[in-house]
Amino acid sequence: MTSRISLRSVFFLIAFVSVLLLLGGCGDSSPDVLALDIDGKTVELKLEKMDIFLVDPEAESQYPESFEITGPEVILCGKFPMTTRVGYGEKYEALKGKSIAITRENIDAREPKRSSLVVPGLGEALVEDGSSFVVNKIGKGVDAKTPLRGTVTLKLRTAGGQRTVNGTFKVRGTTWG
């Protein structure tokens, strides 16, 4: 006795699985992390947010937009090139593919912050000038939080000396201004 499965049932099953994958498997529900390659091992540091501080359009020729990426053990401060503006229209596409400087300190003198990490096995690491990141993927934003993914190069100063580490990040960006 042979059993026959109708093509209609197979098509329905394939369509159902495809919808499940699109809704669940391709979503952006992965945790926000900074994943660094330290001595051949991946070390993940939790990220909470990326705040992007906008500049009044009348002052754009004088000041860059700046940002802070933070997590329990992460503070990364920086500024965008003068010609790169996310702006009030939340044009995150302006960041795609650009090398963006991570600086030693933020530019807000009222709330000074120092770019630094606490890395398991290394301890506290200060982030030095010359560090940068590149956004290579921009997700669909929800509740004014837009997922950004990319690569990062950090020049670190630790108790054991200076070193450069590479990695990836995923963080949700929000504009303020």
Image (tube, helix red, strand yellow):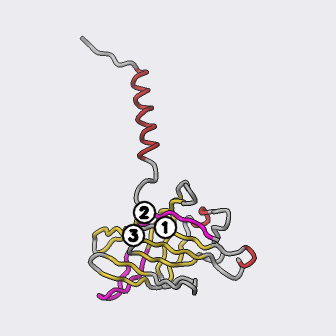
> Any magenta on residue 4?
no
- Whether the residues at callouts 3 and 1 have beta carbons within 8 Å, the answer is no
Is 92 drawn above or below residue 69 in the view shown? above
The amino acid pointed to by label 1 is: Lys
Q: Which mark is residue 167?
A: 3
The answer to which image quadrant residue 107 occupies is bottom right
- Where, quadrant-wise, is the N terminus in this rendering? top left
Q: Which residue sits furthest right?
A: 58
The amino acid pointed to by label 2 is: Asp
Q: Earlier in the sequence, mark 2 or mark 1?
A: 2
**Label 3 neighbour load within 10 Å: few <14, some 14-19, many 20+:** some
* Left or right: residue 124 compared with residue 89: left
Is 121 drawn above or below residue 161 in the view shown? above
Considering the numbered disc 2 on the image, is that residue within a helix, a strand or a loop? loop
Q: Which residue is mark 2?
A: 32
Q: Which residue is mark 1?
A: 49
Residue occupying image coordinates x 73% and y 73%: 57
> Any magenta on residue 155?
yes
53 or 99, nearer to the observer:
53
Residue occupying image coordinates x 37% and y 86%: 157
User: Cα distance, mark 3 to mark 2?
Assistant: 13 Å
- Where, quadrant-wise, is the C terminus in this rendering? bottom right
Q: Which residues are magenta?
A: 153-176
Tell me the mark number nearer the camera, choosing from 3 and 1.
1
The amino acid pointed to by label 3 is: Gly
User: Cα distance, mark 2 to mark 1?
Assistant: 8 Å
